[in-house]
Amino acid sequence: MQSLGPMAAPREAPMLREAGAIGALPTIPHMHTSSIEFRGQPALRASGADGSTLTVALHGAHLLSWTTADGRERLYLSPRAVFDGKTAIRGGVPICCPQFNQRGMLPKHGFMRNLPWENQGVDAESGALTLRLRDDDATRALWPHAFEARVAFTLEAGQLRTALSLRNLGGGPFAFTAALHTYLAVVDIAEARLEGLQGANRWDAVRDDRHVETAPALRFESEFDSVYAAPAQPLRLVQPGGTLEIAQGATCTETVVWNPGAALGAKLADMPEDGFRHMLCVEAARIDEPVQLAPGAEWQGWQQLRVL
C-alpha cells in the first residue's frame, strides 16, 4: 500500500466496541489448540470440529493459514515471507495498529505486527482463540500510552472471524488507526472479481483520483490500490473455484483493496514475481478518521470470511 490521503465523506460509525459483536457468531463447541513451530518460529494451531484449521504466529498475532474442511487454503502466505521474529510477515492477516501505513510518526503500519504476543487460550464464552499484547518499555518509547490489545479468532464451519480490540489503560485519551490487512488466496487474479463496492466513495492511490465507484465488479489487470468508504453489505470475492463473502464491523469505516500487479510485485523481495497472481488484499480498516479512545474505553473492529 502507498501512503494514503484523506477520504471524502467517510461513513459515520460508532467509535467503541459493538455490543455482542463476537457473541453473535455461533461457534464450534470444540476447538482444539496446540503449540507448534512454523518456519522456525513459535505458533499455534487450532482445529474445529468440522476439520477446519487455522495457524497463528505468536509474532504479531499473525494469522498465517485458514484451511476449510475441504482442505482448501483460503489465505495467501508468500513462500518468501521472512520468519525471523522481527520482520513483518508477507501474507496471511497482518495486524496494522496503532497506525495504518505511513500516516503518522510510527514505523509503517505501527508496531504491533512486529512484536511477540501472549497466547490467552480459547475463551470459554466466545470459543475464540485469543492473543494479547500489553504496553512495555519498548512500545512506550515509540508510543507513550498504556494499552491492552487482543486478537480473537473464531472458527465456525466454512467461516472465520478475526477481531481486534484495543483498551486504553492509561489516564488520558489517545488516538489510533488500524487495519486487518487480509491477504486472500486466489487461483488466478485475472479470473477473480470483487463485488459489492459499486456506489462507494473511492480514493484510487495509484492515480490519486477520488470518485464514486461505478463498476458492479472490480477486475484486476494491473496494480490496484484503493480505499473505499466501507459499504453496509458484505462483499463477494468470486472466482471459478467458488465465492467468499467478506463482512466487516461498522467500526471499520474503510475497506482497502490492494494487488501489487506485475511491476510492483517484481520489486517485493519477500514475494515471488508471480505472487501477485495468487493474492488479493481486502482489508477491514479504520484509517480516515482516527479512533479517539478515552481512559478505560475499548474499541473493537472485526472482519468475517464465509465460504458460500
Image: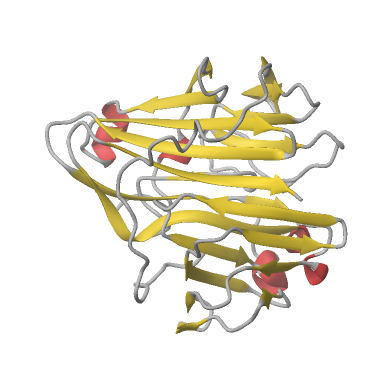
What residue sits 53% from the left and 71% below the top? Answer: 226
Q: Is residue 16 above or below residue 278?
A: above
Name the quadrant containing residue 29: top right
Q: Nearer the viewer, residue 16 or 113?
A: 16
Q: Nearer the viewer, residue 306 or 92?
A: 306
Q: Is residue 210 above or below residue 137?
A: below
Q: Residue furthest left?
A: 171
What residue sits 57% from the left and 35% below the top? Answer: 25
Q: Nearer the viewer, residue 273 or 20?
A: 20
- Percent x, y of residue 229: 45, 68
What residue sits 51% from the left and 84% below the top? Answer: 207
Residue 174 in view: yes
**In the image, 229: left or right of 154?**
left
- Percent x, y of residue 193: 73, 69
What sort of colour scheme is used for the picture? secondary structure
Q: Is residue 301 above or below residue 133?
A: below
- Percent x, y of residue 295: 17, 35
Q: Nearer the viewer, residue 158 or 218?
A: 158
Name the quadrant containing residue 127: top right
Residue 270 in view: no
Name the quadrant containing residue 216: bottom right
- Percent x, y of residue 297: 24, 35
Q: How many marks?
A: 0
